[in-house]
Amino acid sequence: MTSARPWLLSAPALVIFAVMLLTPLVMTAVLSFNSFDFYGGIKPTFGFQNYADVLSDSYFYEIFLRTFLIALATTVIAALIGTPQAYFLLRMHPFWRSLMILVVLGPLLISVVVRTLGWAILLGNNGVINDALRSIGLIERPLKMMYTSGGIVLALVHVMVPFMILAVWAALQRQDPATEKAAESLGARPATVFRRIVLPQAMPGILSGSLIVFSLSASAFATPAILGGRRVKVVSTTVYDEFLNTLNWPLGAAIAVILLVSVLAIMVAWNKLVEKRFAGVFE
Amino acid sequence: MAILELRDLTKRFGETVAVDRFTLSVEKGEFVSLLGPSGCGKTTTLQMIAGFETPSGGAIHLNGRDLAKIPARSRGLGIVFQTYALFPHMTVEENVGFGLEMRKVPAAERKKRIAATLDLVHLSHLSGRYPRQMSGGQRQRVALARALVIEPELLLLDEPLSNLDAKLREEMQLELRRIQQEAGVTTLLVTHDQSEAMALSDRIAVMQGGRLVQEATPFDAYDRPTNGFVSSFLGKSNAIDAHVESVGADGTVLRCGDLRLNGPAHGEAAGPVLISLRPERIEFCGEGDGVVAGRVTERIFLGDQWLFKVDTSLGEILVMRRNSGRREPDVGETVHLAWQAEHLRILAVETAA
Ligand SMILES: Nc1ncnc2c1ncn2[C@@H]1O[C@H](COP(=O)(O)OP(=O)(O)O)[C@@H](O)[C@H]1O
Ligand SMILES: [Mg+2]
């Protein structure tokens, strides 16, 4: 009797999980095996035609490659910005620290769409940045920033850095601050202390933060949709187009499944690597 | 010659004075303990010597050099932190070698010195382990080895044994003393544990409220405390308020309520004083020989000792007797207490600062 209780207690959550997440996922997977005819619509057949179409078309390869490169660049830049920032946060006076944490997390309270539209205003050919540069005479023709991968990375980094900071900060809080003093007393300069003592202890945080940032960036939709539009397509905007413009739902579903599986594979491989590297060192 | 000299060292944190005109010198090869209750400024003193806190006043000299302008990383001190502060991502060998690496010691010599130091702390067989895979006592030894391998002029230890359980702590005390003597390193230990300070040190500096109150060998500090604080902090002690009645060449007569007590010769001519009497110096005796009579209110068996609380006209008196297998007085029994006049310590009454 008692063994049923845990299941009963978690039943509401399980039901929501099944209805809201599992069902659409399974239906998407099923859909990806159906076929599509421009005149007849979706046919409930079963086949790997959609996967074959995607995997044999260099157009899709390019989109997948671009997506992962954007996600990778975002992850690396977010780590480069977020790690020192988390360290500064840790070293701050408690009063300033709580204020700065609010500043760091504040953007999360604003919708990604609103923030990205803000970037569009800044980055456009007649945007704030180009106008300013032109008016002080640094450039003649506007720098192209909208509808570029670089612009997308820039805006994604802005969205993702708080996640990286939180992950690194959690790791840094677990370290004994006396280890830095110990290194110093043994003759290490501040830069050496950071590189040899702080950074390795922050590494589990950087790696788990990278995992979050990479997967969120690879599947981000709003930012690439607004800043990349039709010209710089990523996987998620391609799926959107297949569903809503071409109306080829099965193909869109196949692309979505491939994205899901490849992000999962990258995450699992990454996790394995991390575990192997840090076995025995940290908990 | 003194290796370390602290002169009027002072540290203020805003309004609080953590260390107040602290003066101390430590000789080469000596083992000195800073002993005092929690919050008396021991750690702050150590941190100033190490270079992690800037003194508000006074001077620190190491081997004749003024340390004021020298950053922590150039002071060349070996420090063992209360939490050990081992680098969790490095093996024992890498931890110990870190200081040598910073000093750019060539790899071959580094290896030799790491091996020798690990040998000294009996950890050679664990050189490849990570700190997480070791027990508290082993981590303690790694921390010690890491501090000693750089052959520091001075070893600083901040409550190094307080994270160990009682049995291990006793073992490590002996180990620490052995290692310190084998390495011949001048050592300054900070502790709030009086038995640790007495067991380990050549000299004890007792601190109270940021100030030095007594500096003596463990035996002298215990046997000749300079004030009531030291006598109650080092071991157990009976404190009795009294008045000096007369001072003679061979002793002092004290009045304590209706009772007249004989004490050793003392400078104080008259007025209120504090008498300190160690519980183990008091004996039970026959009715005629007793200084004071009382009733046993509590009796605690400590294995090798008995501890009695006796209600007397002098107040509650602690008596400690060695367990010699004989029958000892029971709770409720009337006993007579005696001691030799020379065992009384007459201390000045502390004026509330
Ligand atoms: N960074 C600090 N800021 C303010 N007060 C401090 C600081 N460090 C220590 N103190 C104060 O100084 C006094 C001495 O502290 P400490 O040296 O740590 O004592 P101990 O090591 O003897 O327990 C305490 O009253 C403590 O509250
Ligand atoms: Mg302390």
Image (tube, coloured by chain):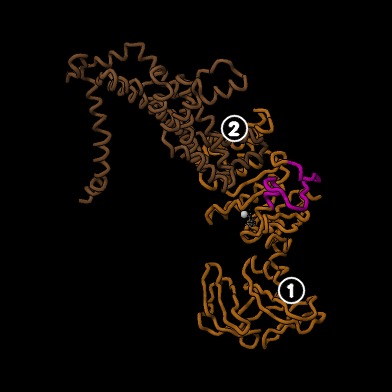
Q: Position of B123 compared to A258: left or right?
A: right
Percent x, y of residue B306: 55, 72
Task: Give the chain coloured orange.
Answer: B
Look at the picture and state if B69 lies above or below B110.
Answer: below
| Residue A276 visible to the viewer | no
Residue at the image point whose x is 65% and y is 51% from the top: B177
Task: Give the chain coloured brown.
Answer: A
Q: CA distance from mark 2 to mark 1?
A: 56 Å
Residue at the image point whose x is 24% and y is 20% from the top: A250
* Mark 1 residue type: Ala
The chain under label 1 reads: B
- Residue at the disc numbered 2: A195
Look at the picture and state if A88 lies above or below B314.
Answer: above
Residue A103 is inside the magenta segment: no
Residue B35 is marked as none
Image quadrant in which you'd find residue B317 = bottom right
Residue at the image point whose x is 78% and y is 48% from the top: B61
Residue range in magenta is: B45-70
Look at the picture and state if B100 lies above or below A241.
Answer: below
| Residue A197 visible to the viewer | yes
Residue at the image point whose x is 65% and y is 36% from the top: A190
Residue nearer the viewer, A168 or A5 = A168
Q: Position of A62 compared to A128: left or right?
A: left
Percent x, y of residue B207: 69, 61
Q: Nearer the viewer, mark 2 or mark 1?
A: 2
Percent x, y of residue A165: 50, 36
Mark 2 packing: few (<14 Cα in 10 Å), some, or many (20+)?
Answer: few
Residue nearer the viewer, B7 or B192 = B7
Q: Under tag 1, what secondary structure?
A: strand
* Mark 2 residue type: Arg
The chain under label 2 reads: A
- Residue at the disc numbered 1: B348
